[in-house]
């Protein structure tokens, strides 16, 4: 593979307890999930120890900031 070709980032586990990756969170967010409660219901993320909830919220916020294209959120 040429170095100029982009490679997809490998998934990173956000919720170790339930095996939920950042890719899964992004997919669920893109499908309309907007809250941590809904994310937990759909994926199980955060339902065991909860230590992943802050990172999960950041990913949800990122996805929705891009989807809404709000430059103020990108700078935050």
Image (cartoon, rainbow, N blue to C red):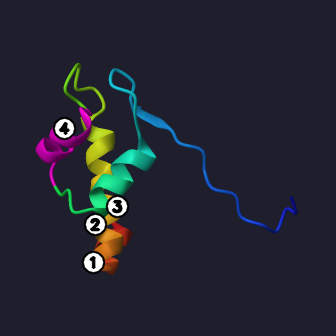
Q: Is residue 68 above or below residue 35?
A: below
- Badge 4 is on which residue? 40
- Measure the C-alpha gap from mark 1 to mark 2: 6 Å
Query: Residue 9 location in percent, x, y?
Result: 60, 51
Q: Give the secondary structure at mark 3.
A: helix
User: Which residues lie in the magenta part?
Assistant: 35-45
At 27% across and 39% down in the image, what residue appears? Answer: 54
> Which is nearer the N-term, disc 4 or disc 1?
4
- Label 4 and label 3: CA atoms lie apart by 17 Å
Q: CA distance from mark 4 to mark 1?
A: 23 Å
Label located before the other in sequence (4 or 3): 4
Q: Which residue is mark 2?
A: 64
> Contact (CB < 8 A) between labels 2 and 3?
yes
Residue under circle 1? Answer: 68
Q: Quadrant of the C terminus?
A: bottom left
At which x and y percent is residue 69? 33, 80
Q: Nearer the viewer, residue 67 or 32?
A: 32
Q: How many marks?
A: 4
Asked if residue 9 is among those painted magenta in the image, a careful observer would answer no
Q: Which residue is mark 3?
A: 62
- Determine the residue positioned at 78% across, 67% down: 5
- Looking at the image, the residue that sits furthest to the left is 37
Cα distance between the residues tagged 2 and 4: 17 Å
Element on which disc 2 rests: helix
Q: Residue at x 14, y 46 (%)?
A: 38
x, y percent for residue 28: 30, 53
Rendered image quadrant of residue 31: bottom left
Looking at the rendered image, the disc whose residue lies closer to the viewer, 4 or 3, is: 4
Secondary structure category for the residue under label 4: helix
């Amino acid at each position: 593979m040429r170095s100029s070709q982009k490679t997809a980032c490998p998934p990173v586990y956000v919720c170790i307890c339930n095996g939920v990756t950042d890719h899964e969170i992004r997919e669920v967010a893109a499908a309309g999930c907007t809250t941590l409660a809904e994310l937990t219901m759909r994926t199980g993320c955060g339902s065991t120890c909860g230590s992943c909830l802050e990172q999960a919220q950041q990913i949800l916020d990122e996805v929705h900031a891009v989807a809404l294209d709000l430059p103020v959120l990108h700078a935050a």
